[in-house]
Image (tube, rainbow, N blue to C red):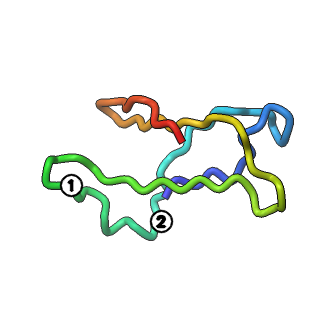
Amino acid sequence: MFPCNKWLSSSEDDKQTVRDIKCASDSPDSSRRGSLTPDGKVPYEIEVVTSDKANAGTTQHGWILLEGNKKRSDRFLM
């Protein structure tokens, strides 16, 4: 699990739109760590929640980039 619990906004909270998020060591999916797909890839499931408030969605185009010790992914558009 990669908890952020922060706004990604240029006008809210600390006004940051980019976050480096570290993996939580107490992830409920820790038993899946190290598992690979048959073609040798690491499976990820990413969930992004904009808000629990009515009409608080976004029209902006977001992306996610995964970075490890050896490689960096391309941008994944959401």
Q: Earlier in the sequence, mark 1 or mark 2?
A: 2
Q: Secondary structure at mark 1?
A: loop
Residue 39 location, x and y as percent?
Answer: 14, 48
Q: Is residue 7 left or right of residue 67?
A: right
Q: Quadrant of residue 67?
A: top left
Q: Residues within 10 Å of mark 1 (few under 14, many from 20)?
A: few
Q: Disc 2 residue type? A: Asp
The residue nearer to you, when weighing 11 against 32, is 11
Residue 68 location, x and y as percent?
Answer: 36, 37
Q: Is residue 63 above or below residue 22?
A: above
Q: Quadrant of residue 35?
A: bottom left
Q: How many marks?
A: 2
Q: Residues within 10 Å of mark 2 (few under 14, many from 20)?
A: few
Q: Nearer the viewer, mark 1 or mark 2?
A: 1
Residue located beneath label 1 in the image: 36
Residue located beneath label 2 in the image: 26
Quarter the C terminus occupies: top right
Mark 1 → mark 2, Cα distance in angstroms: 20 Å
The residue nearer to you, when weighing 61 against 24, is 61
Q: Disc 1 residue type? A: Leu
The residue nearer to you, when weighing 45 against 58, is 58
Q: Residue at x 42, y 38 (%)?
A: 66
Which dot marks residue 45?
A: none
Q: Is residue 7 above or below residue 67?
A: below
Residue 41 location, x and y as percent?
Answer: 23, 47
Q: Residue at x 13, y 54 (%)?
A: 38
Q: Is residue 36 left or right of residue 10?
A: left
Residue reaching furthest left?
38
Q: Residue at x 38, y 53 (%)?
A: 44
Q: Is residue 36 left or right of residue 44?
A: left
